[in-house]
């Protein structure tokens, strides 16, 4: 990355100085000129790569690949490993989406597709289940505890993808996770901090003492073990899908629900099915983008944003200049307004995907964008915006030796989901029900609005923002990208792809470049620390934008896990290392 070791030493000195001096000078929101050029180096490999939210999970995946497993085998192993070492989002009690690409064989073109293993509303769920007699939202009910939980899809999803594409025995792929849970692993500073941050809520929500609770809190370097989770994983490793949706694990899950007024029954578990869906495909400046269709809004929104951006010379605007962020904000305003109104689970409601992602529609929709002044969102439906909770999702990207690629984003929704651990089975349950529009016009924890199309119905999937995405160029794989971050997932993936395609950044630069976010309502531009110079901030204000340097952006935005395939076939893995995260790229 750096031409000489002198440049590299300078970069390290420069970054260190900024880290220490910045806060004292109150410059933390100021632009570090082209600081993405000083991004930590990506990890390079010429054969295979895994990038995930935790070093141990990435290494488990890399060993599966080294051992001759394919990207799908590695995905199963990484997914279960994250459910142990990264419990704030890695899960068996939640759900997610996979976008995949099968490398071309025997002269055939590459095949792409998606798997939807998103949670579903229990059969006893109903449209107004979070409202009181006056029709007001009962605060917290869709976020914490038993009633917040959707029917988990992760284990069924992993079983389905393994059945279709796996090459290694299922139990061998789960074994590393059983060992990690049984023998324990050492807490990183971040993992210890996060377990400690939620001690009170864990104690409040659970009617037993889950192993994450600890008198006096956890310390960095301590070993933590999860014997109950190990037993659950061992059962799944022997019995496959049935080890979760039937038998003693299912019994304990249903008991847990009944003990606290939750809705999930044996019938819900038995009926859960993941769904293979066609991806959203569109082109962007000569690249083919492949992303997730509804029930995620990710692919549709990404198609609207990138195809909207394509009519402008983005590179000429200058990265994170006032004009650049202004334009992105205007595109995002219109896209998120569409998201709130038009998108929902296509198994339940009609969504005009072709119309919404068509170039003619997008051109007309963006036709009133002025580069001189912002459009006002306030003329559109106003929304109550709750303070954003810390929210977590997690993404991992994998490329194997044959060139197969997997992008999986999976989640419990909020950090540790409903904060509820199944007694005796040791895993966290999601609070994904909050991703429904629990009342029209009432913002969810990400400030996102929704309407009828995303209303609760029995068996329906809640709308998501998860955006696992692949990029091809000239028929060859170019990138695998995705991120956590709730509502900011879509805009982070948008900016990362534009960074790679418009600004010719490496994977590491694209991941570490500072990002902005806007979502129609609230009508503000959120700025991550270090995104803009004062002059550019003034340029945005002069166009009428209200700026919001969001203090918790480090939890919310831009934690992208990317793999870039360079022209010579070298793989570059980039995990976000700049914000104190444990994310890790492992390749060979
Ligand atoms: N729970 C976050 C999302 O699916 O968008």
Image: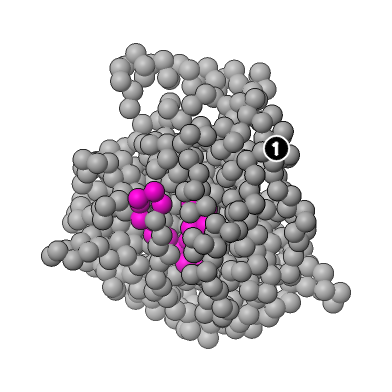
Q: Is residue 504 left or right of residue 71?
A: right
Above or below for 313 versus 117: above
Q: Nearer the viewer, residue 293 or 487?
A: 293
Instruction: Name which residue lies at 74% across and 64% down.
Output: 442
Q: Residues within 10 Å of mark 1 (few under 14, many from 20)?
A: some
Q: Which residue was labeled with disc 1?
A: 543
Q: Position of residue 164 (x, y in %)?
A: 28, 73
Q: Is residue 285 magenta?
A: yes
In the image, is 305 to the left or to the right of 477? right
Vertical side of 213 occupied by 357: above or below: below
Q: Report the residue that reaches farthest toward the right.
A: 134
Q: Residue at x 48, y 54 (%)?
A: 307
For the N terminus, the quadrant is top left
Q: Position of residue 363 (x, y in %)?
A: 54, 57
* 44 or 174: nearer the viewer: 44
* Left or right: where 544 falls relative to 360: right
Q: Which quadrant, please, contains the C terminus?
A: top left
Which colouring convention does the figure follow? Answer: one colour
Q: How many marks?
A: 1
Quarter of image, res 356: bottom right
Residue found at x 26% / y 52%: 474
Q: Where residue 141 sits: x, y (%)?
A: 72, 67
Read off the magenta span: 284-306
Q: Is residue 51 magenta?
A: no
Q: Nearer the viewer, residue 495 or 170?
A: 495
Looking at the rendered structure, the secondary structure element under dot 1 is loop
Q: CB at mark 1 closer than 8 A to ligand 1?
A: no
């Amino acid at each position: 990355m750096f031409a000489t070791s002198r440049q590299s030493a300078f970069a390290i000195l420069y970054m260190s100085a900024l880290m220490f001096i910045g806060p004292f000078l109150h410059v933390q929101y100021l632009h570090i000129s082209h600081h993405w050029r000083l991004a930590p180096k990506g990890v390079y490999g010429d054969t295979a790569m895994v990038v995930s939210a935790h070093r141990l999970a990435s290494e488990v995946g890399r060993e599966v690949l080294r051992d001759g497993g394919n990207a799908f085998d590695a995905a199963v192993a990484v997914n279960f490993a994250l459910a142990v070492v990264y419990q704030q989002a890695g899960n068996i009690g939640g759900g997610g989406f996979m976008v995949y690409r099968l490398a071309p064989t025997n002269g055939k073109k590459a095949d792409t597709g998606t798997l939807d293993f998103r949670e579903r509303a229990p059969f006893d769920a109903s449209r107004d289940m979070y409202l009181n007699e006056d029709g007001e939202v009962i605060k917290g009910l869709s976020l914490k505890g038993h009633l917040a939980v959707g029917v988990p899809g992760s284990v069924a999803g992993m079983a389905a993808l393994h059945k279709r594409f796996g090459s290694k025995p299922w139990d061998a792929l789960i074994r590393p996770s059983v060992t990690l849970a049984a023998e324990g692993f050492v807490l990183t500073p971040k993992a210890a901090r996060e377990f400690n941050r939620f001690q009170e809520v864990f104690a409040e929500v659970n009617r037993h003492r889950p192993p994450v609770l600890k008198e006096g809190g956890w310390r960095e370097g301590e070993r933590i073990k999860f014997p109950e989770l190990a037993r659950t994983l061992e059962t799944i490793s022997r019995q496959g899908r049935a080890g979760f949706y039937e038998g003693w694990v299912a019994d304990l899950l249903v008991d847990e629900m009944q003990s606290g007024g939750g809705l999930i029954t044996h019938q819900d578990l038995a009926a859960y099915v993941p769904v293979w869906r066609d991806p959203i495909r569109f082109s962007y400046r000569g690249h083919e983008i492949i992303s997730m269709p509804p029930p995620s809004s990710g692919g549709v929104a990404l198609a609207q944003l990138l195809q909207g951006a394509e009519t402008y010379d983005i590179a000429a605007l200058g990265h994170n200049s006032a004009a650049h962020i202004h334009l992105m904000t205007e595109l995002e305003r219109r896209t998120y307004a569409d998201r709130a109104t038009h998108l929902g689970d296509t198994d339940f409601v009609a969504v005009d995907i072709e119309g919404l992602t068509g170039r003619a529609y997008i051109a007309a929709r963006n036709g009133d964008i002025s580069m001189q002044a912002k459009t006002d969102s306030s003329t559109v439906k106003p929304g109550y915006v709750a303070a954003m909770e810390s929210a977590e999702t997690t993404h991992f990207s994998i490329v194997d030796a044959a060139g197969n690629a997997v992008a999986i984003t999976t989640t419990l929704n909020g950090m540790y989901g409903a904060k509820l651990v199944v007694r005796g089975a040791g895993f966290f349950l999601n609070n994904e029900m909050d991703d429904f529009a629990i009342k029209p016009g009432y913002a969810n924890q990400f400030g996102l609005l929704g309407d009828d199309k995303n209303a609760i119905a029995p068996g329906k999937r809640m709308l998501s923002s998860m955006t696992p995405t692949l990029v091809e160029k000239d028929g060859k794989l170019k990138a695998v990208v995705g991120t956590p971050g709730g509502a900011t997932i879509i805009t982070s993936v948008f900016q990362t792809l534009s960074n790679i395609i418009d600004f010719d950044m490496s994977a590491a630069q694209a991941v570490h470049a500072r990002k902005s976010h806007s979502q129609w309502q609230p009508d503000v531009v959120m700025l991550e620390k270090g995104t803009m110079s004062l002059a550019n901030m003034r340029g945005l204000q002069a166009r009428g934008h209200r700026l919001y340097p969001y203090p918790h952006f480090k939890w919310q935005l831009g934690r992208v896990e990317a793999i870039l395939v360079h022209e010579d076939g070298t793989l570059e893995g980039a995990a976000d290392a700049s914000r104190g995260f444990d994310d890790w790229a492992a390749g060979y």
